[in-house]
């Protein structure tokens, strides 16, 4: 049995009862967290474009909920719409080791299909775990060389979607392997759009959600795919990676749960800013500093942070400011949290700009060596009264060892759901409260105004 | 202006009036030829699977025709269905230099959109030329290293679809470049499925047709894509090729018409068998040989033919026999043409097997050196009466210098359309007769039972 077949077998056979309680709890956390991000796509122009197109090509009604429009349509169309919506606020979850954002490409198709086939909450949760476990391992397998050119959330995400939907559809191990074959041969997503800040990120997650779903439905109907789309001689790794590691594909299946390694995003900024932001917060709390006490901040970072954030010196848009280390640190120094509102209201305020320009990044060998398995935060703060203070966090807020409480997840989800008028406070509060009990739902219905 | 921008500008601005008469005639030939191949997908299991899925996720009615079912639906869904159908009989056209099959990924989306927006026949023809010119150049640009791992008809085909649909939608040059950006970042297709004869080829052409169409519609709505998805630092070439040649992208736009370089497939077999088949026919005609006169045939071929056809020694299925050089030569030796019926009825017949086992392939430096720009056919025949006869064709039947007449194209299209009960003889005859006049259609309607 190849590693690909082993992974397919695991994804096909995974049942709720076999999943440890802490993993179940984590996938519930991740589902609630996704709910907020999906509604946060409301009002986004690229999300609206994809949604408008997909709805115009699909049926006028159907079993599956489109989160940003409150309409319903076929599962394929809904998966595309919700996949487009869930990643745009840049607040959805991330798995550090694979640099992969699972929620948007797992829950978008899985919820749409669960609604369409009348699956139970437990079935949805188990299928979602299958999607996380597959997508994360495929991302790790494809490696850093892949991530340099390809948006892993688009590529590995297509297989994650297929695995989640395939589990819901009850595919046999052989059918699941065909589904992964079809998903892998339609997997796509290139970073080139970043150069001109184009809209492709939302297209990648929409595409992965839809193409993976299609692959699973086709497999259920007897449509065959490559036997080893991942590690074959003309497969994904040969075409799109130079450092793939096949041992990652079926690494400790059923004993290592990659799902629980997934991190929540606490700040509404590029993940590369989070470790330093939390380290600064720690220095300020430990030493009771205020923003005016700070003369200079040196952040000690991994090379990837310098590559991504280094060019952003004088951010002119809210979106760009989320990639400015100085802006993020200035916001947390003032508000203890860099959320959507803090960016919108204060990214160009005088106190923000003043501290922003006192922040520098330097490469730190320890931080760089630990990345991407661990994202260590280190800062050195010089104070107005002449002190030099070092701060360190070994895991940024939201990482597994420093995770969010259910109360924090609830508040974050409601904040995201309401911020762009995706839902009212009352709707979001009720929906999140219901979602925490999804394991008891006999049948997955509408998430907003519906529930079990 | 980058080469990508130049290509986008050309595709956006191309109008029917600017296209030379011989190119117009050729695109009409190619459209009629495609019509037959699209209907030949009727009854194919993988085509039926994709069609069933796509129709189940789309609207129950719409402006665009699904050729194999006679239903109609949204253009996106119809493009996927017809894209799946048009490549399965392996009789659709091919551009030698790019090893790219344009018709399935150009006409499938272009006809669907023309029907949806009420475009004229001339608009459809111009848009189709835009699709051919873009797809062929992208295939040439991506090079042979790309084709070793990736199915160019799937990858370059996504951009070909976007160009054809974008031209119909009247995209500006900037919008067309965004459409190419979105198409390129969702382009996919790996050869790995060949190893186990899986169904992915039909998924690739369905995916390319749909994703390209979506990219163009999104661009029309203001959705942006990468500025240089083809040649950028994290674009298609960087991710999926090691020998890309940017000069191919905008090679003599408007003066070199790649459309007219496209070949028709005359035999219903792998294209790599065609040059030798035609060379054998020539020897037999020139020397009035019958099959029993032949003791041995040595075909002198390019390396690609040995790679693809070499493993097929004792074909056990009709589909596999189309990749058997011996079977193809045995059929043309008996029937002068290796069509769908010849394969179905005679691929395992005693006379076929007897000659099949007398055929060998040897690498020929001249043939290999000319490939893929030219596909030269060379054979040496040993006869029962002791003669050694050499045969040669510089272009196999269907290539531009040895093309099919309109009567031959008509007969081929009707044969394909009727062979799998995709249409009756009367329907196919009427539809093809109407299609030859498409340049005078004020509005593209249904191709079967409809017309102008």
Image: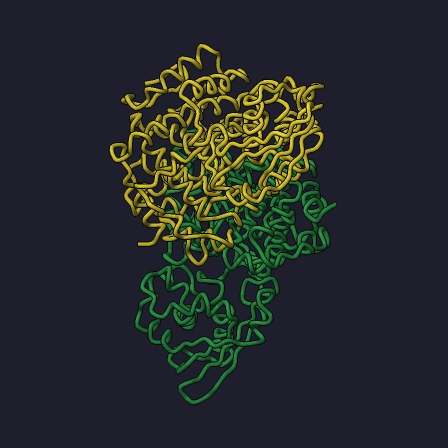
Chain colours: A green, B yellow
Considering only vertical position in the picture, is A178 above or below A98?
above
* Nearer to the camera, B20 or B116: B20
In the displayed image of the protein, which residue is found farthest to the left? B17
Considering only vertical position in the picture, is A303 above or below A220?
below
Q: Quadrant of the N terminus of chain A?
A: top right
| Left or right: residue A383 compared with residue A221 | left
Rendered location of residue B336, percent (x, y): 56, 20
Dividing the picture into quadrants, the one containing residue B387 is top right
Q: Residue at x 61, y 59 (%)?
A: A243
In the displayed image of the protein, which residue is found farthest to the right? A1
Dividing the picture into quadrants, the one containing residue B34 is top left
Q: Quadrant of the C terminus of chain A?
A: top right
Considering only vertical position in the picture, is A162 above or below B296?
below
Q: Residue at x 59, y 67 (%)?
A: A374
- Counting labels gives 0
Rendered location of residue B32, percent (x, y): 41, 23
In the displayed image of the protein, which residue is found farthest to the bottom? A386
* Nearer to the camera, B173 or B132: B132
Dividing the picture into quadrants, the one containing residue B253 is top left
| Left or right: residue A316 compared with residue B346 | left
Rendered location of residue B210, percent (x, y): 45, 36
* Nearer to the camera, B130 or A403: B130
Q: Is residue B157 visible?
A: yes
| Left or right: residue A235 compared with residue A83 | right
* Nearer to the camera, B246 or B292: B292
Rendered location of residue B176, percent (x, y): 33, 44
Q: Residue at x 36, y 50 (%)?
A: B4
Q: Is residue A118 visible?
A: no
Q: Residue at x 49, y 61 (%)?
A: A266
């Amino acid at each position: 049995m190849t590693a690909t077949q082993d992974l397919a077998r695991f994804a096909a056979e995974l049942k709720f009862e076999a999943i440890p309680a802490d993993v179940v709890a984590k996938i519930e956390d991740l589902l609630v967290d996704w709910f907020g991000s999906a509604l946060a796509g409301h009002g986004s122009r690229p999300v609206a474009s994809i949604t408008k197109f997909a709805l115009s090509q699909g049926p006028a009604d159907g079993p599956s909920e489109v989160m940003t429009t409150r309409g319903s349509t076929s599962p394929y169309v809904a998966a595309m719409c919700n996949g487009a919506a869930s990643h745009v606020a840049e607040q959805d979850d991330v798995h550090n080791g694979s640099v992969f954002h699972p929620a948007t490409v797992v829950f978008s198709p899985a919820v749409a299909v669960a609604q369409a086939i009348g699956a139970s909450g437990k079935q949805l949760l188990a299928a979602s775990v299958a999607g996380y476990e597959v997508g994360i391992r495929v991302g790790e397998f494809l490696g850093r060389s892949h991530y340099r050119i390809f948006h892993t959330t688009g590529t590995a995400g297509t297989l994650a979607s297929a695995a989640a939907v395939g589990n819901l559809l009850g595919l046999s191990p052989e059918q699941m392997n065909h589904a992964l074959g079809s998903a892998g041969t339609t997997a796509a997503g290139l970073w080139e759009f970043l150069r001109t800040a184009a809209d492709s990120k939302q297209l990648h997650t929409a595409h992965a959600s839809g193409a993976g779903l299609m692959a699973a439905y086709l497999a259920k109907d007897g449509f065959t795919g490559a036997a080893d789309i991942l590690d074959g001689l003309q497969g994904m790794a040969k075409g799109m990676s130079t450092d793939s590691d096949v041992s990652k594909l079926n690494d400790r299946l059923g004993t290592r749960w990659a799902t629980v390694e997934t991190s929540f995003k606490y700040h509404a900024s590029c993940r590369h800013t989070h470790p330093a932001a939390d380290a600064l917060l720690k220095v300020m709390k430990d030493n009771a500093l205020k923003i005016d006490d700070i003369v200079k901040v040196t952040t000690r970072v991994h090379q990837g942070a310098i590559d991504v954030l280094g060019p952003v010196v004088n951010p002119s848009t809210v979106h760009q400011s989320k990639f400015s280390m100085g802006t993020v640190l200035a916001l947390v120094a003032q508000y203890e949290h860099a959320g959507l509102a803090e960016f919108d209201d204060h990214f160009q305020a005088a106190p923000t700009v003043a501290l922003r320009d006192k922040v520098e990044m330097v490469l730190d060998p320890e931080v760089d060596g630990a990345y991407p398995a661990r994202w260590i935060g280190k800062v050195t703060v010089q104070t107005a009264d002449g002190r030099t203070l070092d701060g360190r966090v070994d895991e940024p807020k939201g990482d597994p060892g420093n995770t969010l409480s259910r109360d924090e997840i609830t508040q974050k989800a409601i904040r995201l759901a309401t911020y762009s008028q995706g839902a009212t406070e009352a709707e979001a509060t009720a929906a999140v409260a219901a979602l925490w009990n999804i394991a008891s739902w006999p049948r997955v219905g509408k998430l907003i105004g519906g529930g079990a």
